Image (tube, helix red, strand yellow):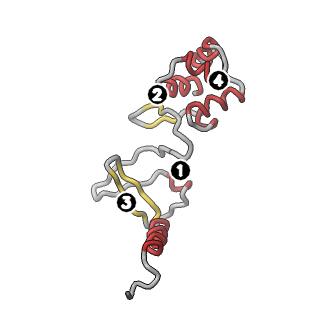
Amino acid sequence: MLKDNLVMLRKLNGYSQEQIAERIDISRQAYAKWESGATIPDLEKAARLAQVYGVTLDSLTRTENVDGIGTLPPAPPGKNIWGSVALGDRGQIVIPKPARDKFALKAGDRLIVASDENGIALLPAETFESRIREIMTMISPADSRG
């Protein structure tokens, strides 16, 4: 797990083993041993690696697999991949249980479907509507009757 994540993160960020080793103050050989799985970093060095790569220490040490894709690199803090869903005949999807649990979603909850050129997002309707009301209050004059 750790060794795979170290290789993926280093390559994704365009670093050489030497560059990472210099950033965390170890030898290239020591870093190469971590990537091969021959040894593992102590907690302090692992924390430095997580900081360099912009991930949590927890995600650095875990492997996430997605069907049809394979092993994913650790995501930055606050970013998650919950798995894939299939679109039903009428456009319905089932949100994976870990995501439903994380966001306390239950049957009957309303979600806003938003998008940009990169993809689709689902937002709790109450949160979205509350934020829109706040924005409208800020931009509306106190007395709009003129």
Q: Which mark is residue 113?
A: 3
Say which element carries label 2: helix
For the residues labelled 2 and 1, the Cα–Cα distance comes to 27 Å
For mark 2, what is the residue? Answer: 12
Q: Quadrant of the C terminus?
A: bottom left
| Kind of residue indicated by mark 4 | Ile
Instruction: Report if residue 121 is visible in the image.
Output: yes
For the residues labelled 1 and 4, the Cα–Cα distance comes to 34 Å
Q: Which mark is residue 98?
A: 1
Does residue 68 appear left or right of residue 96 in this picture? left
Q: Which mark is residue 126?
A: none
Q: Which mark is residue 24?
A: 4
| Kind of residue indicated by mark 2 | Leu
Q: Are marks 4 and 3 in contact (CB under 8 Å)?
A: no
Q: Earlier in the sequence, mark 2 or mark 3?
A: 2
Classify mark 3: residues with Cα within 10 Å, few (<14), some (14-19) or many (20+): few
| Residue at point 47%, 31% (across, down) | 71
For the residues labelled 1 and 3, the Cα–Cα distance comes to 19 Å
Closer to the eye: label 2 or 1: 2
Instruction: Report if residue 108 is visible in the image.
Output: no
Q: Earlier in the sequence, mark 2 or mark 4?
A: 2
